[in-house]
Image (spheres, rainbow, N blue to C red):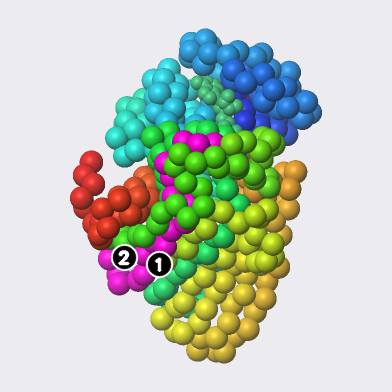
Amino acid sequence: MNKLRMAFIGVGDMGSHHCIGFDLIPECKVNYICDMNQANVERTLAELKNDNPVIVSDYKELLNKEDIDAVVISVPNYLHREVAVAFLEAGKHVFLEKPVAHSLEDCDAIIEAAEKNERLLQIGLVYRYSNVYRRMAEELQRNRLGEVKLMWCKEFRDPFPPTDWFYDKKKSGGTLVEKDCHHFDIFNWMIGSRPTRVFASGGQHVMKQGQQNRITNSYSHYPAKVIEDVSIVDHAWVTIDYENGSKANLGLCMYLKPRNLMGDGLEIGLIGENGGQMVARNDKTIDIVGGVDFTRDHLDIDVTSDSIMGGHTGGQTQRMAFVKSVREGGDPFASAYVGREALLIALAAEKSIMEERYVYLNEFTR
Ligand SMILES: NC(=O)c1ccc[n+]([C@@H]2O[C@H](COP(=O)([O-])OP(=O)(O)OC[C@H]3O[C@@H](n4cnc5c(N)ncnc54)[C@H](O)[C@@H]3O)[C@@H](O)[C@H]2O)c1
């Protein structure tokens, strides 16, 4: 079978992982890398085990290349529309990092380009491919909790990487768009109903607009940096109501130093109508307790086989699923549609913070 010939647009923190991961898949060939940041290109090249890609600095040079079947786009959010639409119009399949875009208008333009050109569009909602959250969904299908009525996500962490675009709401869409589209998607997936309204409260406790914010981050390769132009929130509480009466809540803190040392990391919890609870901790374990059979299970999940180099659980499974979808057709599990649903909640939450009111999702029309 011919190899899937690929190009990588943006090889910063995320794009480098994608390039290294696809290079390890035997049915793929990394033909091109496009990034104007030479240091990021060199970091990526140093990790490739198989292929020897051509390097360019302007993605437009790649649009008409015949030896590209699919592109992986990992550029900052405000560039998603420009780059994704260009490649979809050029007839390439696209793996696009989350969020689909930083605005609904851009998101819909990308979806329209994919539909019009009948190209595959998979979004980097990596949790959908994670052994942990797939197991959680399986346990729900086995009716361990009955219908999920309450959900929460607690993410108390260190700041985004010290790179300016994250901190500029016009470029990232804001903290809840950039980061929590992942968590809103998990809520939608597990609850299995449509969100109707969102109320959020958030602001700037520590990283404040106009002050000398020295940003450090525990996982990125970028060195610490002072960033003054900070237009995003550094904390929030977000409540979401669903059509079926279920409710979800996200608690977010982005200013822990040096990172979350409590050891519990990300926590995603559910309570079912049968009075049982299920909690995933640290993207690694699941506890299921209570309910009609007074169950008490602790599950240590294998989060090595679905990732590479200690990267995000689900990271490599999502890449293999992309290759399979390009070959065999069918909608990806992380489709543009589920990406759009998660984005709607995030945009509603950002709006709710600004306008200090419930925001109804039907205020956003297509
Ligand atoms: N799925 C996840 O868990 C996850 C995690 C981190 C980031 N992301 C997403 O990945 C994307 C990139 O984030 P990151 O952390 O890698 O950011 P980053 O700033 O580290 O990397 C962005 C890269 O894009 C390059 N770039 C900018 N404009 C370009 C252009 N026009 N053409 C080619 N390259 C260009 C930059 O030089 C840089 O190397 C964002 O959409 C982000 O939300 C997803």
Task: Tell me which corner region of the image, top left, top right, bottom left or bottom right, holds residue 12.
Answer: top right
Q: Crowding at label 2, few (<14), some or many (≥20) Cα neighbours within 10 Å?
A: some
Vertical comparison of 302 with 28: above or below: below
The percent coordinates of residue 199 (x first, y second) are 31, 61
Residue 248 relative to residue 46: left or right: left
Q: Is residue 74 left or right of residue 27?
A: left
On whether residue 247 falls in the magenta region, the answer is yes
Which circle's residue, 2 or 1, is located before the other in the chain? 2
Q: Which mark is residue 191?
A: none
Would you place residue 209 above or below residue 279 in this image?
above
> For this rendering, which residue is in front, 223 or 276?
223
Residue 149 vs 330, above or below: the answer is below
What residue sits right under mark 2 in the picture? Answer: 242
The 10 Å Cα crowd at callout 1, few under 14, some 14 to 19, many 20 or more, is many
Q: Where is residue 331 in the image (x, y as percent from the top left)?
A: 44, 42
Q: Where is residue 243 in the image (x, y as percent from the top left)?
A: 27, 66
> Which quarter of the rendered picture does the C terminus lie within?
top left
* Disc 2 residue type (three-letter): Tyr
Q: In this view, does 332 lie above or below 84?
A: below
Q: Which residue is drawn at 47% across and 77% down?
A: 271
**Residue at (20% x, 50% y) in the render:** 363
Residue located farthest toward the front when viewing the structure as drawn: 211
Residues under numbered marks 2 and 1 in contact, where contact means CB atoms less than 8 Å apart? yes
Residue 304 horizontal/vertical position (percent): 73, 53
Q: In which quarter of the image is the N terminus?
A: top right
Q: What stretch is highlighted in magenta?
A: 227-248
Residue to which mark 1 is pinned:
248
Q: What residue type is labelled 1?
A: Ala
Cα separation between marks 2 and 1? 8 Å
Q: Which of 93 and 230 is in front in this view?
A: 230
